Image (spheres, rainbow, N blue to C red):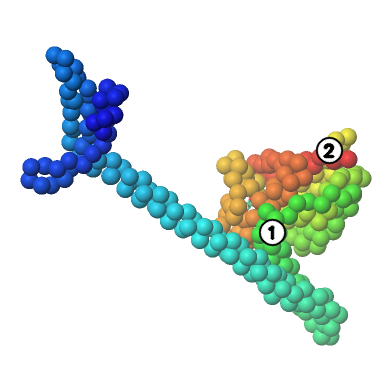
Amino acid sequence: MLNIAMKTGSNFFEWTHRRADGTDFPATVLLTRVNLKGKTFIQATVRDITEQKRAEDTIKNYALNLESEVKRRTTELEMEKRKVEGMSEMKDEFIRNVTHELKTPLSVVLANLTLLKDYSPVGREKDWTKLLDMMERNASRLNHSVNQILSFSRLNEITPKRERTYLNEVVDSVYQEYLPLAVAKGISLELDIEPVIVMGDREMLAIAVGNLASNAVKFTEKGMVRIILRGFRKSATITVEDTGIGMRPNEAKRAFEQFYKANPSAPGTGVGLTVTKEIVEKHGGEIGIESKPGKGSTVTIIIPRGI
Ligand SMILES: Nc1ncnc2c1ncn2[C@@H]1O[C@H](COP(=O)(O)OP(=O)(O)O)[C@@H](O)[C@H]1O
Ligand SMILES: [Mg+2]
């Protein structure tokens, strides 16, 4: 150390020094060569760096702790992620079970109800039919709810097919499906369509339109529901008008929210419009509501023809 200072003029290094009482302490040493009256001296400046070392150690420890804390959190997050993935698998499995356990027996009930209508006891035909109709309506409602929940829970996973779809056929089948319900309620269901082909997912579009018809018939007690289909060069519009209870502006705004129902005790799952909007948007389309309380509602969807 001294030699370096003699040769180069100075030397700076860390060193462990011993105090008079025998205890060691860390220090920095600066050796400087000094020429004084023709003689060469080495001047030493020693600085106690105990505090500095302590601070450095604290920082080092802190960094180490931080690192292990980050590791711990990362492991925790990975475990969470795995748990969520597991849950999503469980959800899929659950949905498959629900499908089987609810839909299969329901379809048996519905099919047999239709058959039963031919077996009315003589003299009691009217009562018999009335009861069976009631059972059929309720079984259909249950079937509808199960389908709603299923289409809602599967929404994220599916991308719409791109198949040549006659929207008029889709809309017509929805009309046929809701006609008996409208007749039973004493409201008229009108259909005003023209042939339109779009590239899209037939089944999903039928669900989207079905939800609109379902709402219109459900929330209308007198008057009519009209389903209109128009084809344009680049798009098609489907409009479902009703003369039902209508919605206040804030209700119409919230109608697309998951599980939202303006009247929580009205029948329904509150996911129909969420599903419809999602399907429409997955087709690159748009949806809008115009509504007045007590007057009725008009829901319009625009689907790009994609041809
Ligand atoms: N045609 C309509 N007339 C009046 N209110 C409607 C209509 N369509 C939707 N709504 C309101 O929007 C809510 C959400 O509709 P939706 O998502 O289809 O769920 P659900 O039909 O299961 O209640 C309904 O509960 C209702 O309050
Ligand atoms: Mg609905």
The crowding category of the residue bearing disc 2, from other C-alpha atoms within 10 Å (few below 14, some 14 to 19, many at least 20), is some
Q: Residue at x 17, y 23 (%)?
A: 41
- Specify the amino acid type for callout 1: Arg
**The C terminus: image quadrant:** top right
Q: Which residue is drawn at 66% across and 65% down?
A: 92
Instruction: Residue 84: give x, y in percent of width and height.
Output: 56, 60
Q: In the drawing, does residue 169 fall left or right of residue 103?
A: right
Q: Which of 155 and 51 is in front in this view?
A: 51
Vertical order, 188 against 52 (above or below): below
> Mark 2–mark 1 contact, CB under 8 Å?
no
The crowding category of the residue bearing disc 1, from other C-alpha atoms within 10 Å (few below 14, some 14 to 19, many at least 20), is few
Does ligand 1 reach within 8 Å of label 1's beta carbon?
no
Q: What residue is shown with label 1? A: 154
Q: In the drawing, does residue 31 fall left or right of residue 233?
A: left
Q: What residue is shown with label 2? A: 235
Q: Which of 43 and 185 is in front in this view?
A: 43
Q: Residue 266 carries which label?
A: none
Q: Which of 272 and 261 is in front in this view?
A: 272
Q: State which tag comes first along the sequence, 2 or 1.
A: 1
Say which quarter of the image contains residue 144: bottom right
Instruction: Residue 199: give x, y in percent of width and height.
Output: 86, 46
- Specify the amino acid type for callout 2: Ser
Residue that protrudes farthest toward the left in the picture:
21
Vertical order, 177 against 216 (above or below): below
Instruction: Residue 226: give x, y in percent of width and height.
Output: 80, 48
Does ligand 1 reach within 8 Å of label 2's beta carbon?
no
Say which quarter of the image contains residue 17: top left
Vertical order, 273 against 54 (above or below): below
